[in-house]
Amino acid sequence: MIKLQFSFDIEILNNRTMIKKITLFAMLLGSLGLFSQKYDGLALTPPMGWNSWNHFACDVSEDMIREMADAMVKTGMKDAGYEYINIDDCWHGKRDSLGFIHPDPVRFPNGMKALADYVHSKGLKLGIYSDAGWQTCGGHPGSRGFEYQDAQQYAKWGIDYLKYDWCNTDGLKSEGAYLTMRQALKAAGRPIVFSICEWGDTEPWKWAQDVGHLWRTTGDIYNCFDCVYDHGTWNSWGVLQILDLRDNDSLRKVAGPGHWNDPDMMEIGNGMTLSEDRSHFSLWCMLAAPLIAGNDLRQMSKETTEILTNPHAVSVNQDSLGIQAYKHGVIGGVDVWVKPLASNEFAVCFLNRSINEATIEFNWKDNPLDDTFSGKKADFGKDTFEIFNVWENKTLGNTKKSLKATIQGHDVLFVKLKK
Ligand code: GLA
């Protein structure tokens, strides 16, 4: 079946001989056992790291990436679990006469291998970006037709993570194009996390589980809590819009260790209010989303650092079961999201979507938790949990009594229910 999909991806090539050659090559790889699947054992919990795009767009350089690796260690992000330093679009120079890609020699004068060595020496990993089409979204060389060479080059450089975009792909089928790169990465022989970025256009949650380790579910995030930014031919989306764009009940069924829904990189520390940043982070933790920071780590405020590194929030995201939250309901105008955790514990996030303060009274006994997908349940008439406030780092009593709270506009009350 995999061989069929590979052939189908190259249907657009009108050259029969070429197709035969590639199919034979694919079969040879298959018989060597290289064609079986994606790299297993990677991203068993949602990947944590940093990416250049949200803050720097095309303004990337070797110096900046080194400084970001230093900052990830110095700020405590690494200790909190962040691992990947990911270079997004615009690192590219030209292909050489053999077709191998090289980084921009001015921005990356020492080359990618030296940069990867540096990042690895800090105990971190290096990610890179390419595109399934002829060109990246920023107009740089894409991987179309060079998939195996690009994968080999990344492996040679010591790259650990590939974000693979979907601009300039007219005539291509997404599943086939992403399968081709998956096979190329496997054949290159280095374990590389494969991040699919086709914006949810072709419903990757229906086909990407065995192709990549994470897949974008929507178009790009915009640095606002509740807005849509119109670019003319496409939109980018605020935090609430991303939360609502897709059917979460369908998405959560395909998330789990090694394969995650990706609602895009975070905008924390890029200008939203503290309440909004806190809500954004809480939601990404609840959704078992990859935690890829998108701010300038070299000059973060204490508050931003505290949000990104909150150990209780991070532990909800990194829970070993990898169950994505579901929406339990709306109480007093406030969303109630529930994430089953290991050891029969739960995280509950009360989200105030409004800009006005909200007051809630949540009676646990009237709200038994029952997740048919994971089979996790809590009957508060029988079981009592301690309620731990994630952002205030304190216990709020237990589930025998109703939880009463006032939640600021665009803020959350984020609790863990502990046994
Ligand atoms: C697309 C992606 C973004 C970013 C840019 C780079 O828009 O969705 O995350 O990678 O391309 O050009």
Image (cartoon, helix red, strand yellow):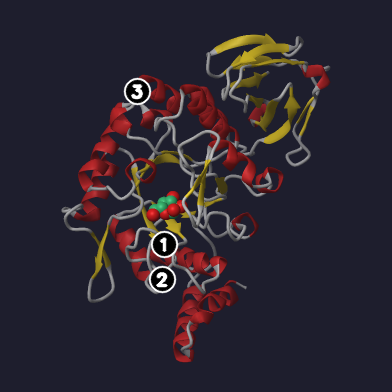
Residue 49's place in the image compared with 331, above or below, is below
* Residue 162 appears in the picture as rendered: no
Q: Which residue is mark 1?
A: 131
Alpha carbon distance from label 1 to label 2: 8 Å
- The amino acid marked with disc number 2 is Arg
Alpha carbon distance from label 1 to label 3: 33 Å
> Does 88 sit left or right of 334 as displayed?
left
Q: Residues within 10 Å of mark 1 (few under 14, many from 20)?
A: many
* Residue 49 appears in the picture as rendered: yes
Q: Which residue is mark 2?
A: 144
Q: Is mark 1 within 8 Å of ligand 1?
A: yes
Q: Nearer the viewer, residue 127 or 331?
A: 331
> Does 280 sit left or right of 131 as displayed?
right
Q: Is mark 3 within 8 Å of ligand 1?
A: no
| Among numbered discs 1 and 3, the one appearing first in the sequence | 1
- The amino acid marked with disc number 1 is Asp
Image depth: mark 2 or mark 3 in front? 3
**Residues under numbered marks 1 and 2 in contact, where contact means CB atoms less than 8 Å apart:** yes
Task: Give the SS element for disc 1.
Answer: strand
Residue 217: image location, x then y, percent: 57, 50
Residue 106's place in the image compared with 15, above or below, is above
Residue 202: image location, x then y, percent: 60, 61
- Residue 301 shows which numbered tag? 3
